[in-house]
Image (cartoon, rainbow, N blue to C red):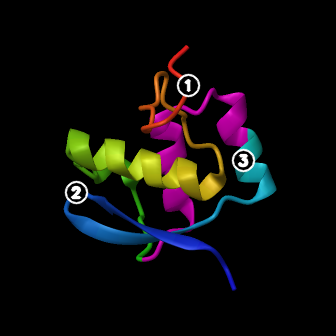
Amino acid sequence: MARTAKIVLDGKDYEVHAFNIGELERITLQGNNAWLVLRIALERAEPKVSDPNMLEPTPDEVRQAFAILMKLAGLEQTAANPPQTAGEDQS
């Protein structure tokens, strides 16, 4: 069964597939550029996107979609200073 996730861009839901090896290579060679990641994800999205340039996503939609796609790809960004839980060594 294929791994998929839902993202929202320009107010519309898209089902995107996990990236294949070639797509992951393109993403990592470009330094995980958010715009490139979105474009690559939309290449195989349902419903089909004929021209990603015509989408007008909000900044929040872009941030959320990028985070979802990076998690789906196993490339999620870690927090610079993750919150510590009670009982963790503070040193």
Type of amino acid under label 2 = Asp
- Residue 21: name its quadrant: bottom right
Is residue 40 visible in the rendered image? The answer is no
**Cα–Cα gap, marks 2 and 3:** 24 Å
Locate the N terminus and report the quarter of the image it occupies.
bottom right
Residues rendered magenta in the picture: 26-46
> Which one is closest to the eye, mark 2 or mark 3?
3
- At horizontal 49% and vertical 59% (from top left) the residue drawn is 42
**Cα–Cα gap, marks 2 and 1:** 44 Å
Sequence-wise first label, 3 or 1:
3
Image coords of residue 56 (percent x, y): 22, 48
Question: Dot 3, how many residues are within 10 Å of its Cα: few (below 14), some (14-19), or many (20+)?
Answer: some
The circle on residue 10 is 2
**76 to 31, vertically: above or below:** below
- Residue 48: name its quadrant: bottom left
Q: Is residue 17 inside the magenta stretch?
A: no
Type of amino acid under label 1 = Asp
Q: Which SS class for mark 3? A: helix
Locate the C terminus and report the quarter of the image it occupies.
top right
Image coords of residue 79 (percent x, y): 48, 30
